[in-house]
Image (spheres, rainbow, N blue to C red):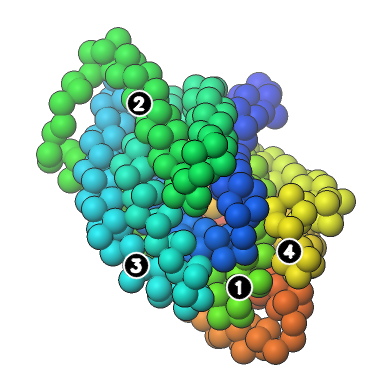
Amino acid sequence: MSPSIPPSPAREITRLAVPAFLALVAEPLFLLADSAIVGHLGTPQLAGLGVASAALLTAANIFVFLAYGTTSVVARHVGAGDERGAVANGLDGVWLAAALGLVTSLVVAAAARPLVSLFGASADAVTHAEQYLRISAAGIPAMLVVLAATGILRGVQDTRTPLVVSVAGFTANVALNLLLVYGLHLGIGGSALGTVISQWGMAIALLAVVVRAARRLQADLRPHPGRVLVAARGGVPLLVRTLALRAVLLLTTWAAAGLGDVPLGAYQVSATVWSFLTFALDALAIAAQALTGKALGAGDAAGTRAMTSLMVRWGLVGGAILGLLLLAVHRVLPPLFTPDPATQAALAAGLVVVALGQPISGWVFVLDGVLIGAGDARWLARAQLVLLLAYLPVVLAVRHVAAPVGDAAALIWLWAGFTVFMTLRGIALALRARTDAWLVTGATR
């Protein structure tokens, strides 16, 4: 008997990946809009945004397991035919997100100054970064609830609802930031406030959808402390994986901060562009998570392998296409973000390396999504810790070599070092995917 993969795997991937792509790019579009608006206030403000964004995204995205882990668990229950259990398990993730978000928000707000000072940026940049981060901390609970609620919807194979909510949130964010920064002259603080308001609007909208589904299925909306603790323990390996990845990004920001305001400002924009492309490619990873979890929940290991091979090919091709598009506009983009010629030149140079690394990114993100969907979190945690250790000498060497070579060359070195890390990560994931250790079937792993 042939593997019981969907009659049209390409159509199934597209059905999930296209809405996921459009929804995922909303988050980096938040930062792109912030970068464009704040960049025209001045280079110190843009550099401050770079530091604050690194700290804020670290505080929020270390809990990305709320989306990834929830997607995997919910999808497995859906594949096993237990839709009520799927939503019930997802709700445990929402309650966990609310608790973690509240605590994290208070910590970040209280420690905003020491957090942004860790990067070694200039005094002016640190002042702007502190203001942005302190205000943005109020949006962290909303960011985490959005992650958990989105994970539920992805797990039940619905990527369209997060798309609608993300588009509405992005539109509101741009309008609010323009009003608050330039209309009311609130500066970088206005940009932070506009984004916070948008994030809470998205959280409320997604929660309304999840609650309606829970009531339809008669799933209990109340928190169950025991189950929430189980969800928390299950998320620990993905948390470790994410912390290791965020450490890599923080180390890269630290290296950029030591090179001066111009390289740091250029890195902030180029990193935001990289994030935009990352989320575009991550749409395939989201489809991989949902489809892998559902297939393994239904006991279909052979179908999982067939789907994985197809999505890896799509990831490589998608990355190549995005890389070519970025190369075509790498000199057009810099003036949109800063009027400073030195920052524009450094940014253009960095974007070339970002573009060349996109096929590697497509390969990495698909394989990462497959293994997350399979619930192979413990291996992912161990692998990312090893890769972090391997990156340490690379980033130290880059900071040493890049300091005296000029702003544009410094950005090239910085992104070249990061590309080395991505290549090593891809090799590790590919070797794991060739084994059968992650192909565990059933409603639970």
Q: Is residue 73 above or below residue 375?
A: above
Per the image, the residue denoted by label 2 is: 204
Kindly report which numbered mark, 4 or 3, lies closer to the viewer in this rendering.
4
Q: What amino acid type should be assigned to the residue bearing mark 3?
A: Arg
Q: Give yes or no for contact between labels 2 and 1 (Cβ–Cβ under 8 Å).
A: no
Label 4 neighbourhood size at 10 Å, few (<14), some (14-19), many (20+)?
some
Direction left: furthest residue: 225
Per the image, the residue denoted by label 3 is: 113
Q: What amino acid type should be assigned to the residue bearing mark 4?
A: Asp
Q: CA distance from mark 2 to mark 1?
A: 38 Å
Per the image, the residue denoted by label 1 is: 261
Label 3 neighbourhood size at 10 Å, few (<14), some (14-19), many (20+)?
some
Quarter of the picture containing the C terminus is top left
Q: Is residue 422 left or right of residue 193?
A: right
Q: Give yes or no for contact between labels 3 and 1 (Cβ–Cβ under 8 Å).
A: no
Instruction: Name the element at disc 3.
Output: helix
State the image quarter where residue 143 is shown.
Answer: top left
Q: Of label 4 and label 3, which has the lower sequence position?
A: 3
Residue 12 position in % (x across, y down): 63, 26
Q: Which residue: 67% across, 59% down?
A: 270
- Whether residue 103 is visible, yes or no, is yes
Q: Nearer the viewer, residue 373 or 396?
A: 396
Q: Give yes or no for contact between labels 3 and 2 (Cβ–Cβ under 8 Å).
A: no
Per the image, the residue denoted by label 4 is: 340
Q: Which residue: 26% across, 27% down?
A: 88
Instruction: Name the element at disc 1.
Output: helix
Kindly report which numbered mark, 3 or 2, lies closer to the viewer in this rendering.
3
Quarter of the picture containing the N terminus is top right
Q: How many numbered dots are placed on residues in this image?
A: 4
Q: What amino acid type should be assigned to the residue bearing mark 1?
A: Asp
Residue 434 position in % (x across, y down): 59, 57
